[in-house]
Image (spheres, rainbow, N blue to C red):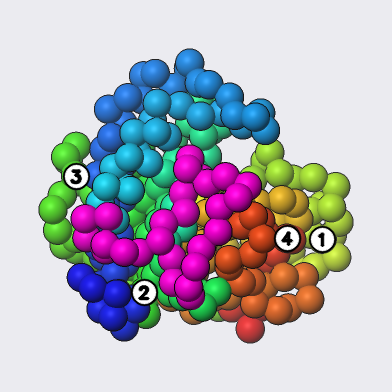
Amino acid sequence: MNQRDFLHDPDATAKLFGLIALRAGHAILKVRDARHNPDYKSDGSPVTAADLAADEVIREGLARDLPGLAVITEETCTAASRVDGDCFALVDPLDGTREFVNGSDEFTVNIALIARGVPVAGVVYAPALRRLYVGGTTAHRLEIAGDAAPSRLDGLQPIRVRDVPPEGWHAVVSRSHLDPDTRRWIEQHRIARLCNAGSSLKFCTIAEGEADVYPRLGPTMEWDTAAGHAVLVAAGGRVTDLDGKPMRYGKPQFRNGNFVAWGKAGA
């Protein structure tokens, strides 16, 4: 696939990303028993053999299938990293490493294509749950059967954000990020119920109509959010800053500010 193809056919690009993510997820599960012996980066965040194995699989796959595409991954990005041009991939080979180390199944592989600051295609794969989310012009979910990484994405089921329930919005949050600022945001809005989810699965929970809003008032990196953002937008949602402006990508050092991910609640 050349650059013209992956820019003009986001659905095909998302499916290609999906196959790469499945292989990366398979690599993660092969070394999952080593999760209890992580190393630590300079910022104190953990990194495991699974992070590095998935990163290698993804970078090799993208170099082979989309040669020439700039790729920014969590494991290879430095403070000096930057991209030239309007099109690049953002990758988190293992989103939710802390959850992974602690034995949770809610960790994901994230791959997204950014064009002119906008995530136009993306996939979120939860290897332990055997669940893949794909977003291009439309959004789909796929349950993976068996232990091997399939070579085709057969059986994709369309997903869509839901109408807001009569009782009010259901907000999805992470227990570890339910800080005072987030609690205040929740108290100031029409939240009827709190749901818990880890990693980028929070975006996907809204995309498949299981929740309505995800506020994040705290630091994240672009590779944490881009793939879930792409899936949510493809399902009819949006992601904005606190002033309602669309969240953009390619920012300095790839850092996000505060944001809210919306289903129909933010329409």
Q: Is residue 110 above or below residue 234?
A: above
The residue at 67%/60% (across/down) is: 252
Q: Is tag 4's residue or tag 1's residue first in the polypeptide sequence?
A: 1
**Quadrant position of the C terminus in the picture:** bottom right
Q: Is residue 260 left or right of residue 29?
A: right
- In percent of width and height, residue 13 lies at 29, 69
Rounded to the nearest angstrom, the CA distance separating label 3 from label 1 is 40 Å
The amino acid pointed to by label 4 is Gly
Residue at the disc numbered 1: 185
Rounded to the nearest angstrom, the CA distance separating label 4 from label 1 is 15 Å
Residue at the disc numbered 2: 136
- In percent of width and height, residue 57 lies at 29, 42
Q: Is tag 3's residue or tag 2's residue first in the polypeptide sequence?
A: 2
Residue at the disc numbered 4: 257
Q: Is residue 16 left or right of residue 34?
A: left
* Camera sees residue 57: yes
Query: How busy is the neighbourhood of tag 3: few (under 14 within 10 Å), some, or many (20 plus)?
Result: some
The amino acid pointed to by label 2 is Gly
Q: Is residue 126 above or below residue 243?
A: above
Q: Depth-wise, is mark 4 or mark 1 nearer the camera? A: 4
Q: Is residue 78 magenta?
A: yes
The residue at 20%/70% (across/down) is: 1
Query: How busy is the neighbourhood of tag 1: few (under 14 within 10 Å), some, or many (20 plus)?
Result: some
Q: Is tag 3's residue or tag 1's residue first in the polypeptide sequence?
A: 3
**Callout 4: SS:** loop
Q: Is residue 222 magenta?
A: no
Q: Is residue 152 above or below residue 98?
A: below
The amino acid pointed to by label 1 is Trp
Residue at the disc numbered 3: 149
Q: Nearer the viewer, residue 49 or 214?
A: 49
Rounded to the nearest angstrom, the CA distance separating label 4 from label 3 is 35 Å
Magenta stretch: give its range: 63-88
